[in-house]
Amino acid sequence: MPRRSSLPVAFVAPTLVILLILSMVPTLYAIVIALQNRELSSTAYSWVWFSNFVDLFSDRRFVNAVWVSVKWEVVTVVATMVVAIGLGVLMFEVAAPRLRNLYCLLFIVPVLLPRVSAAFVWKFAYHPLYGIATYPYRLLTGGLIFDPLSKPSTALFAVASVDVWQWGLFFAVIVLKLLETLPPQPIEAALLDHAKRWQIHAYVTLPMLKAPLISLMFVKMIESLRSFDLIYVMTRGGPGVATETLDMYAFSQGFIESGKVSYASAMAVLMMIATVITFTMLWKRVQA
Amino acid sequence: MRPGRIVAKAVLAFAGFIAVFPLVWTALNSLKNSVDIITRVPRVMFTPTLANISYILGRDSVITGLYNSVIACGTAVLIGVVLGLPAAYAVARYPNRWAGDIQFFVLSLRFLPPVAVAIPLMVIWLQLGLYDTLPALIVTYSLLTISVIMWLAIPAFQGVPKEIEEAAFVDGYGAYAVFWKIALPVAARSLIGAVAFSFVLVWNEFLIALMLSSSNAKTLPIVASELSQQGMNVPWGILNASVVLLSLPPLLFLGVLSGFLNSVFRQKKN
């Protein structure tokens, strides 16, 4: 590489400046708005400083939204990783190369769909009377009604299943590719020691893949923050507030119910601080 | 064959079925009349109709949404390519002590909750008089495309054998000529995957488009979601047809993206 060239500066500087402007302006402005009392209906506003934040902590719907968000995050991340590792190992074990390629193509399809499409596909499928996914239940019980999206106890899991359908299957493909990159010798050594197939994966291959699997989980944690589309289309946060995550609540406070833009922004700012701190710390640990 | 293997194969086959069947079913429903959709027992045999699809394609709102989506996503991806690829190349090939920080900064943009970006941007675009216009959407999407393309292109450029580039320098190529004539063409396959991925990402984007448009700049996902808000008054066949229309463009990239995955992992193996 030539030592003296204008290329690095000429190539990086404009892009970084634009990225900084595009990201810092809204971020800082979100904080400014959160300290005011703006509403959608009027242009007048004044500074109220931290009162939006104080109000949030006594807002029971906000506390509920935090709880739902945490639940969503845990359920989708854990279920995605379980499905991904399970199916990835199964493909590695029993699928011939040609079949593997076919499965890989099939498993990538759901994640390519727009979340809105995926949400619709499954909203139809979960319809209690005419849905294709509830049909087996109707068939077996002789026509009983099962409506997963309108029962508070099942709604979150029903929406989460769509998320896992998209990401779990896709990650299964990645787990398979990761397994294929491993050298065969440790597996052969374990076989010589009469290890069972599941033992080989539990004690040899998966521990060898610990670092990339943790990175994968990290990616899923970030993507799970983007639950809005699914919830908006499938339940609108309902029934009641059973699936109302933070972004759903912020959206409905800011735009549907009351137009309290500043209040919504305060929520968004808290969310932003929490995610940036958490993920920065996690990332540094993953890298270390 | 041991019973364990049979069970394993059955589980896999079932997962493969679950992966695509709901979508196939939606596509079938888009060809049905309402009487064939609203049935307690799913109907596999029916007289197909093109009425739903032609209704969808005949609606102004859908055509406008399609146009907006194509223009907004296409332009944002183009901006992402122009700004993201050179920056990625410089980070990959001319590492300095900030290279790690730059990479982390680009990744950290993905940590920002979309609501936290969309609310202030809505106020900003309102004040600038650009709310509900395509330029506002394009600028906002560029943040997404630039960072994603950069993030994915850095390893792609690192995968180009250094020797090729060094040989070109020896032959008297300048730094820019090496980028244009060597690095870009050699890394092209992976780069196309990265660009396709960024397109799928913004095409599928919903929350920001929802908050930054009210009538003129609505993208296709917004139009599709609105069709459903009229409740069950809208025939299901039409809704299914709009879902199919919305899902087709990302699926066109299925081949490109699975090739991209393969090349990423082949690189890892070597």
Image (cartoon, rainbow, N blue to C red):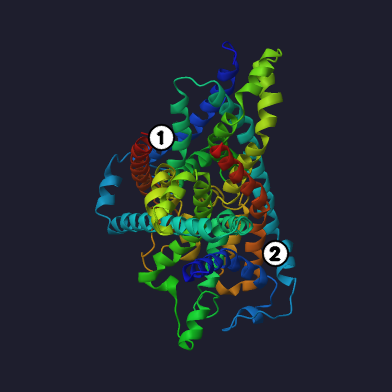
Q: Position of residue A81 (x, y in %)?
A: 42, 54
Chain identifier of the residue bearing label 2 in the image: B
> Vertically, is A85 above or below B38?
above
Name which residue type carries label 2: Ile
Name which residue type carries label 1: Leu
Q: Residue at x 50, y 52 (%)?
A: A171
Examine the image and state in which quarter residue B173 appears. top right
Residue bearing the label numbered 2: B56
Question: Which mark, residue A28?
Answer: 1
Q: Position of residue B255 (x, y in %)?
A: 67, 50
Between A22 and A10, the residue placed more toward the observer is A10
The secondary structure type at the circle numbered 1 is helix
Examine the image and state in which quarter residue B148 appears. top right
Between B214 and A1, the residue placed more toward the observer is A1
Q: Residues within 10 Å of mark 1 (few under 14, many from 20)?
A: some
Q: From the viewer's perspective, is A201 left or right of B201?
A: left
Q: From the viewer's perspective, is B259 left or right of B269?
A: right
